[in-house]
Amino acid sequence: MNQPHSLKGKTGVVTGLANADSIAFGCARALHRAGADLILGYGHPKGEPHVRPLAEQLGDAPLLLCDVRDDAQTAALFGAAAERWGKLDFLIHSVAFAPRDDLHGRVVDSSREGFLLAMDISCHSFMRMAKLAEPLMQDGGCLITMSYHGAEKVIDNYGIMGPVKAALESSVRYMAAELGPEGIRVHAISPGPVATRAASGIRDFDQLLAEAGERSPTRRLVSIDDIGETAAFLVSDAARSITGVTTYVDGGLHIRG
Ligand code: NAD
């Protein structure tokens, strides 16, 4: 493969690492390969043994526990960036959660607590992180979150995550408008289905994967490296005039009816 756009000298925070299958790891790997320096956030203390070896593969990047419900832990991630670099060029927000019962039930039946928790972790945490990143992005920057086509269309078994991702994609547009004058670009990447821990919580996910492989125009599933390389492009100066959009990395699957 040709060398991607160079990110030498760029610094970034990547959140949402759970294991080697995580989309966040695909992003971190591509960003590291392009020359960026990273700080990594993982969401659960039990994840540490899985993510420590990954951090070692990424130039021994500092690894911090960051449960986004914990404001102090979230602030510490950006405090670490301030201390290490005095600036930040990009953020990858690759975090989502919905309680199982709410995810598996009808949207109509979702509990208030479950819906609010899903919104807090999967959507509002991106806004909170953007606020912490903003003062470190004096020279501009790039904020990227992960969405899914269930934001746009009704996808069987995606349940309350559909409305949550719709709110996330709308937030991307508002945040892009607000932060654009400061040179901060805001993106959603919308990957096709990938077998990850989060995805395993979705009912009949294997069927979704099989259909994606058969129905996408490229006739192949996307990999976490495909997603990572798109993130690296969006972070790069080559994407300086692109902001506020949802970029599909799904082999064209979303153009099907
Ligand atoms: P994953 O399980 O590897 O990653 C999800 C991450 O969210 C985990 O690292 C988990 O620790 C983290 N998380 C959950 N609650 C958290 C909290 N309170 N604080 C901090 N972190 C928390 O799965 P993934 O598929 O790589 O998911 C990453 C993102 O990609 C999610 O936003 C997901 O919705 C999105 N996405 C996934 C797919 C797919 O098919 N896998 C498709 C489109 C979008």
Image: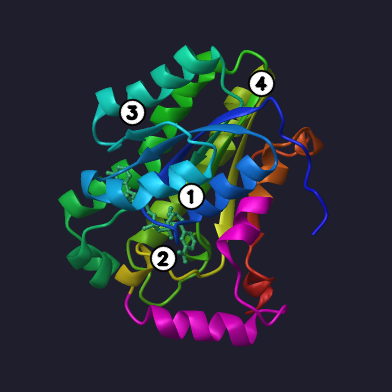
Closer to the observer: label 1 or label 4? 1
Mark 1 or mark 4, which has the lower sequence index? Answer: 1
Distance (Cα) linking label 3 and label 1: 16 Å
Residue in the foreground of this view, choosing between 222 and 10? 10
Badge 2 is on which residue? 196
Q: Position of residue 148 (x, y in %)?
A: 50, 60
What span is colored magenta in the figure? 203-229
Q: Is residue 228 above or below residue 109?
A: above
Q: Is mark 4 within 8 Å of ligand 1?
A: no
Badge 3 is on which residue? 74
Secondary-structure class at tag 3: helix
Mark 2 or mark 4, which has the lower sequence index? Answer: 4
**Callout 4, which amino acid?**
Gly
Q: Is mark 2 within 8 Å of ligand 1?
A: yes
Residue in the foreground of this view, choosing between 244 and 130? 130
Q: Tell me, for residue 184, which label it has, or none.
A: none
The C terminus - image quarter: bottom right
- Residues packed near mark 2 inside 10 Å, few (<14), some (14 to 19) or many (20 plus): some
> On the rendered structure, is 214 left or right of 80?
right
Asked if labels 2 and 1 touch by Cβ distance under 8 angstroms, the answer is no
**Callout 1, which amino acid?**
Ala
> On the rendered structure, is 111 left or right of 80?
left
The N terminus - image quarter: bottom right
- Residues packed near mark 1 inside 10 Å, few (<14), some (14 to 19) or many (20 plus): many
Asked if labels 1 and 3 touch by Cβ distance under 8 angstroms, the answer is no
Q: Is residue 219 above or below residue 246?
A: below
Asked if labels 3 and 4 touch by Cβ distance under 8 angstroms, the answer is no
Badge 1 is on which residue? 24
Distance (Cα) linking label 1 and label 2: 11 Å
Q: Is mark 1 within 8 Å of ligand 1?
A: yes
Badge 4 is on which residue? 140
Residue in the foreground of this view, choosing between 65 and 126? 65
